[in-house]
Amino acid sequence: MITVPYVVKAKQKVIDSLNLGVPVYIVGHLGSGKIQLSTEAALDFTIQKFGEFNEERKLYYKNILTNGRKKEIESL
């Protein structure tokens, strides 16, 4: 998909809706790129969420290693 401003804006609107848990309804002519837009938005959204999840896990383990009790550290 070509990243022209209106496509980037539309994809961001889809991602914002996904973040809010709001259903997305995409309307357009046959072959206008609705599926491509939704696929790329879902991919970007998923990558973003996994990045956040990985950062949370990293901080969780870092906290245990720096501030954890001996039993917690040994369990790692």
Image (cartoon, grey):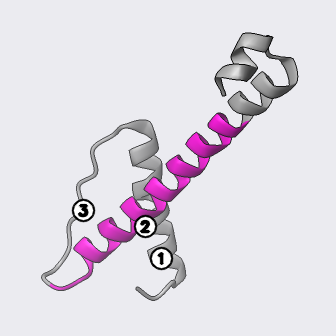
- The amino acid type found where label 2 is placed reads Ala
**44 or 17, which lies in front?**
44
Residue extending furthest toward the front = 74
Is residue 33 shown in magenta? Answer: yes
How far, Cα to Cα, is label 2 from label 1? Answer: 6 Å
Identify the residue under disc 3.
Answer: 26
Q: CA distance from mark 3 to mark 1?
A: 14 Å
Q: Position of residue 39 (x, y in %)?
A: 31, 68
Q: Nearer the viewer, residue 5 or 72?
A: 72
Q: What is the quadrant of residue 20 in the picture?
A: top left
Q: Which residue is mark 1?
A: 6
Q: Which mark is residue 10?
A: 2
Query: Up-down: is 69 above or below 42?
Result: above
Compared with 73, 71 (above or below) is above
> Answer yes or no: do the residues labelled 2 and 1 have beta carbons within 8 Å?
yes
- The image position of residue 58, as x and y in percent, is 70, 39
Instruction: Identify the element where label 2 is drawn.
Output: helix
21 vs 1: above or below:
above
> What percent of the width, then of the height, locates residue 16?
47, 49
Looking at the rendering, in which quadrant would you find the C terminus?
top right
Q: Disc 3 marks which amino acid?
A: Ile
Residue segment shown in magenta: 31-58
Question: 11 and 59: which one is in front?
Answer: 59
Residue at x 76% of width, y 23% of height: 64
Give the left or right position of residue 10, taking residue 72 as reference.
Answer: left
Total numbered labels placed on residues in the image: 3
Residue type for callout 1: Tyr
Neighbor class of circle 3 (other Cα within 10 Å; few <14, some 14-19, many 20+) is: few
Residue 32, given in percent of the width and then of the height, sits at 23, 83
Q: What is the distance, in whole Å, between disc 3 and disc 2 at their CAs?
A: 10 Å
Q: Could you tell me which residue is drawn at 75 percent across and 21 percent down? A: 73
